[in-house]
Image (cartoon, helix red, strand yellow):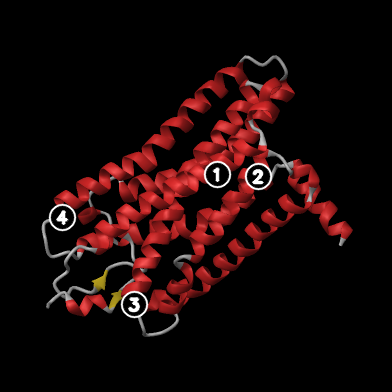
Amino acid sequence: MTNQSCQEQFILLGFSDRPQLEQTLFVFVLIFYLVTLVSNIIIILISCLDPCLHTPMYFFLTNLSFLDLCFTTSSIPQLLFNLGGPDKTISYTGCAIQLFMFLGLGGTECVLLAVMAYDRFTAICKPLHYSIIMHPQLCWKLVSVAWGVGLLNSLAMSLVTMRLPRCGRCKVKHFLCEMPALIKIACVDTVAVESTVFILSVMIVLVPLGLILVSYSYIALVVLSMKSAMGRRKAFNTCGSHLTVVSLFYGNIIYMYMQPGNHSSQDQGKFLTLFYNLVTPMLNPVIYTLRNKDVNGALRRLVSRK
């Protein structure tokens, strides 16, 4: 009976304890969100429209941009709605969907970044066999696995989290229905749930990260043994972009999810979540295209053709 009231809606407190900050945040979040939408859509368009970019690397980059679009859109519109007015509520169904999408898309990105690292490993360590190994069918299978693993992991985590009894506690100390914040308002012992979440987090976060580190260890050995300075510079530029994205994404994810739920939803947790949910997806297109002659050339050709 006491849990009945939370079966209809939750209250996302977000930044309501700092009302003077909400208006400023609204402007910044709106600008960053629009830039994220435009920049990632541009990456998707030029990768699909320019035949020169129909390669495995840009196929995966297109999927990453699409993921970032969905990942940001899963929570930022709700945040803008809450920042722009006094209503901070979200329906129970809306909260469950947001949690599932947020975890699913985040988990998919973890695996996709590992797939992209494998692509770079094959391109640099096995250049003569690259086109044979990374054929279109394999690329589609790898992307399908990334989506499948991410969504299945999210389904397990979401069910465990949403089924916790809350005894009428509906106030979530976050700006979205985020797993540690929802676990924190449960009115039962959550040690078993936190242990389950930790194991699933290890599988979805640390396993792909380990594969990324192994791939780049081999890449570093091959690059350092190259005699051509131009070849080394090109390899470092390509891999440096991916490593920067990996560092930004995984750094925040590990801090947020590789610790118990009762210690990860403080004020700094809100800003970290905002960073990897908004700033990182906005920076990804910039990081990948800033020194990328292929993308810059494709963009110029697309603009001149129009």
Neighbourhood count class around disc 4 (C-alpha, 10 Å): few under 14, some 14–19, many 20 upward: some
Which residue is rendered at x = 23% and y = 54% of the image? 261
Q: Secondary structure at mark 3?
A: strand
Tag 1 or tag 3, which sits nearer the N-term? 3
Q: Which dot, 3 or 1, sits closer to the camera?
A: 1
Outermost residue on the front side: it is 137
- Check disc 3 and give the amino acid type: Ser
Residue 292: image quadrant is top right
298 relative to 225, above or below: below
Q: Where is residue 181? Give x, y as percent.
A: 27, 62
User: Which residue, given by chain and number where applicable, does mark 4 sit on?
Assistant: 190
Q: Residue at x 54, y 56 (%)?
A: 68
Labelled pair 2, 1 in contact (Cβ < 8 Å): yes
Q: Is residue 163 left or right of residue 231?
A: left
Would residue 93 be found to the left or right of residue 28 on screen? left
Can you give x and y, in whole percent of width and height, for residue 76 in the image?
Answer: 47, 68
The disc label shown at residue 143, or none: 1
Q: Return the x and y of residue 215 as percentages of the image width and height.
A: 51, 27
Can residue 265 be seen here? The reply is: no
Q: Residues within 10 Å of mark 1 (few under 14, many from 20)?
A: some
The span from disc 4 to disc 2 (Cα, nearest Å) is 41 Å
- Residues at marks 2 and 3, CA–CA distance in whole angstroms: 36 Å
* Number of other residues with Cα within 10 Å of mark 3, as a class: few under 14, some 14 to 19, many 20 or more: some
What label sits on residue 91 in the rendered view?
3
Pointer 2 or 1: first along the chain: 2
